[in-house]
Every structure is written in structure tokens, then in C-alpha cells.
Amino acid sequence: MLITNVNIITEKIENGYIKLENGVITDVGSMGNCPKDNDIYDGKGCYAVPGFIDAHTHLYNNDYGYFDKAYNSGITLVAVSPDSSKPVGGEVKIVSTATKETMGVAGIKLALGENPLKKVENTNEIVLEEIEKAKGTVFLHVHSKEDIDLVKGKDVVFVHGTDCQGKCKIIAGPMLTDISKKEMENLSYENMARQYKEGSLIAICSDHPETPVDFLQLYAQIAVKYGVDKDDALLMITKNPAQLLGVDDCYGSIKINQKGGVLLFDSHPMDFYSRLIKIL
């Protein structure tokens, strides 16, 4: 299939084309270099973006049709994570919303803070030991500065990362929820915008079912209201989560060999009134 006459936002190509073969992008460029094809979908000026990625959910714990709702809202991949009730949660799995198949394992989930401390007194020691042993990416549930400082200098992806300062790797959210614990008291879009301006690599998540997975686009749109650039907010639900999950070779961009799907919108997806026209 050849998708023509589209504005490819993430690659900054105005009036471009995208060629798909068996769900994989095989060519991208401007319409001036567009090849011929018998199977053409005319985008008619739509905005083309990669399939969205939610980097932190607990979707298997509460499906109720949410895989389908996620896919129909443009989310093609989700990370499904264990909860934070124990210091060592287990594997973070990458799941296709279209097929519900596990596509791979992103890393291991660990947890600091109020949740695991309710059950395990020596949580800090366990987590530090597990970080040293880990052979892959560590996704660390954490909110407070005290807990973040405990792992200072360690190569981890902070899940929530509410009190992170400086350049960190953060899966931020959920934002549209109540402050249910003291360690979350600084949770806000203003705080996330500060982290963005400090140079953190940020992916926005739903933490479903804390907030519904199918509103991921809305959570990114609200980030724009608080000072995040529109194109950068889009990266927070496409390229950035792909990078943090270690799947950016195949997902999160509109480039050759990418296979995360192509979404067509009638305007920039970070505009509140934008509509998803087609999933290809």
C-alpha cells in the first residue's frame, strides 16, 4: 500500500508518502519522489504519525475490552507491568493491542516507596541488590526524592518519577488521578513540564486502570497546555516510549523497517479537536 499526500509530523515531511508492505514501512519521502503503486490510499492532507505506545499499564488485570479500545484510539503497543506491591514485581511485557500477543520483554519491574514497604521492611536493600544483578532494563516504581536519591547514578527508568530532577528517563503519569499517598504530593503536569524543560526523556503513560488507556492521546494533549511543545508531546507517546522500552528499532517512528502502524489524523494529534481518520 502507498499512502500519499500526508504530512508526516515526526519526520517533519510536508506533503509526503509512506509505502507499507505487510505492515512494515519500506519507503518514506516527499511527494516529489513518490513511486508508483496500484494500491494507493490518498491521505488528502491528513497528518500521519506512528502508532501510539503506552509505556506503563496493568492491562491484563482489567481488560473489559480495553485492548480493543486502546487499538481503536491509535495505541498499537502497550507495556504490561506487574503491580508495585512487592520490591521485585517481575517482567515488563510488550503487548500488541491488535492481537493481544506478547511481542517481547522490556525488562524487570522493581518498586520503592509506600506500596512495597507495607509488606517488606527491607525493600531498599532488595531493590539495590536487584539493580546490581539486572542484565536488562530496570523499570523502577518511585515517587519521592528520598527514594530517587537512593538509586542516584544507577541506570534505571523511573516509573512515575514524580520528584525526579535533572536529566532522567521517566515514564510519567498517571496525571489525571487523585493524590492518594504522601509520596505523590508533587504529582502534576507543571512538575512534568519542569522535568521536560530540564532535558529528561519522558514517556507519558496511563497506568491503566488508574486512568483509562484509551485516553493516552488526551494526556499528551494536556501536557501541551502546561508548556510542552506539540511535536515533543507527540514523541512522548510514540518515539520516547519506544526508546525506553527498547523497541525503537521497529516502533515509534515513521521510517523504513518500522512496523508500529500509521495513524492518519485530520489535524495535528496534539490539537484537542483532532480526529483519528484511519489506522493503517
Image (cartoon, rainbow, N blue to C red):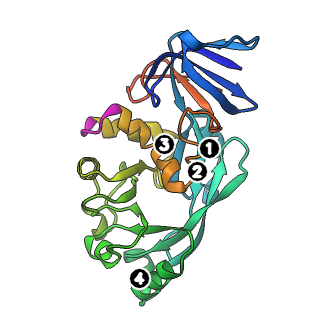
Task: Name which residue type carries label 3.
Answer: Lys
Q: Which residue is mark 3?
A: 239
Q: Earlier in the sequence, mark 2 or mark 3?
A: 3
The reply to whether dot 2 and dot 1 touch (C-beta < 8 Å) is: yes
Residue at 39% over, 73% down: 154
The residue carrying mark 1 is 250
How far apart, in angstroms, are the residues tagged by discs 1 and 4?
38 Å
**Which class describes the residues within 10 Å of circle 1: few (<14), some (14-19), or many (20+)?**
some
- Of the numbered discs 3 and 1, the one sitting upstream in the chain is 3
N-terminal label among 1 and 4: 4
User: Which disc, if any, is residue 17?
Assistant: none
Q: Are marks 4 and 2 in contact (CB under 8 Å)?
A: no
Query: In whole angstroms, how far apart are the C-alphas of marks 2 and 3?
Result: 9 Å
Residue 39 magenta? no
SS class of the residue under badge 1? loop
Res 255 quadrant in image: top right
At 55% across and 12% down in the image, what residue appears? Answer: 31
Mark 2 lies on residue: 247
> Are there few (<14), some (14-19), or many (20+) residues within 10 Å of tag 2?
some
What amino acid is at disc 2? Answer: Val
Q: Is residue 199 left or right of residue 126?
A: left
User: Bounds of the magenta span?
Assistant: 225-230
Q: Which mark is residue 117?
A: 4
Q: Position of residue 7 (x, y in %)?
A: 48, 19
For residue 165, side relative to residue 137 (left or right): left
Q: How far apart are the two marked residues, 4 and 2, measured between alpha carbons?
A: 32 Å
- The CA distance from mark 4 to mark 3 is 34 Å
**Residue 55 position in % (x across, y down):** 51, 52
| SS state under label 2 | loop
**72 is higher (above) or lower (below) than 198:** above
Determine if the magenta segment contains residue 226: yes
